[in-house]
Amino acid sequence: MKDEDLFKEFNLEQSKKEKERKIKFDFEFSDFKSVLYTGLFYLFGLFLGSYFYKITQFENIDKLLAPSSNDFLELFIANFCVYFSVFVLVVFLGFCLIGFPVVNAVPMTVGIFTGIKLAYYFVNYGVKGVGYSLIMIVPFSALFVTVIALTIEISTNLSQNIMDCTKNADLSENNVDIKDYTKKYLIYAVLILAVSAVNSVMTCLLYSVVTI
């Protein structure tokens, strides 16, 4: 009898541990699901962009991608306009009912343009292009995509909450705190500004060191 009781207790304990592991896995995956999706879509965009450049290699694309200035203010304005435009698009999709299904098109598009840029340097400048990309493109692209991934996570959550509001027709039950979302967006906007500034500074400092 005692052995049976011990066996039952052992089975109950094992079952409890399995449920805890399953809950823990579901919790962790749900926490990072949006960021993982953003990373996957970005990587897919990198592949598409590099492949597109490889099969086309238009001269007009080369002219657009070639570095043309090392002036800080000019670089900062250019970087900020591009980065902030993408950021604003992600924020806008957060306030749309259909925002959360299509928001992952943003990191894929960013990945396409980054892939084209990387392929440009790899194809045209060989080893120097690889070094230039590792120093000047990859780190800042990673920082930018990280900020965008965090912003996408907020926008996805907001868009889904707005969708729930329209379905239930009761704002009080869904508790969409716009002020809280706005505060988070402002924090990431400051990070976009910082990434633009650091990118511009590093480009100015390394422009003469890394000769393309």
Image (tube, helix red, strand yellow):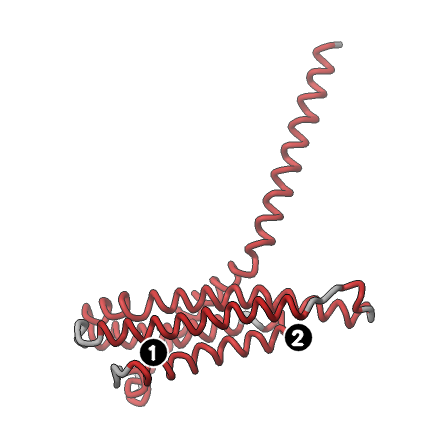
- What amino acid is at disc 2? Ile
Amino acid at circle 1: Tyr
Vertical relation: 121 (above or below) 2: below
Residue 144 sits in quarter: bottom left
Q: Say above or below: 31 vs 96.
A: above
Judged by depth in the image, the label closer to the viewer, 1 or 2, is 2
Q: Residues within 10 Å of mark 1 (few under 14, many from 20)?
A: many
The foreground one among 141 and 188 is: 188
* Residue plotted at (82% across, 71% down): 169
**Residue at the farthest right position:** 169
Quick one: which residue is furthest to the bottom in this view? 60
Q: Under tag 1, what secondary structure?
A: helix
Residue at left offset 38%, top offset 74%? 196
Q: Quadrant of the N terminus?
A: top right
In-image side of 66 versus 19 (left or right)? left
Q: Secondary structure beneath disc 2?
A: loop
What is the residue that sits farthest to the top in this orientation? Answer: 1
Q: Position of residue 41 (x, y in %)?
A: 49, 66
| Quarter holding residue 137 | bottom left
Q: Are marks 1 and 2 in contact (CB under 8 Å)?
A: no
Q: Using residue 186 as the reference point, say whether residue 158 is left or right of it.
A: right
Q: In this figure, which residue is indicated by the disc labeled 1?
A: 53
Which residue is label 2 attached to?
A: 98
Q: Position of residue 25 (x, y in %)?
A: 59, 45
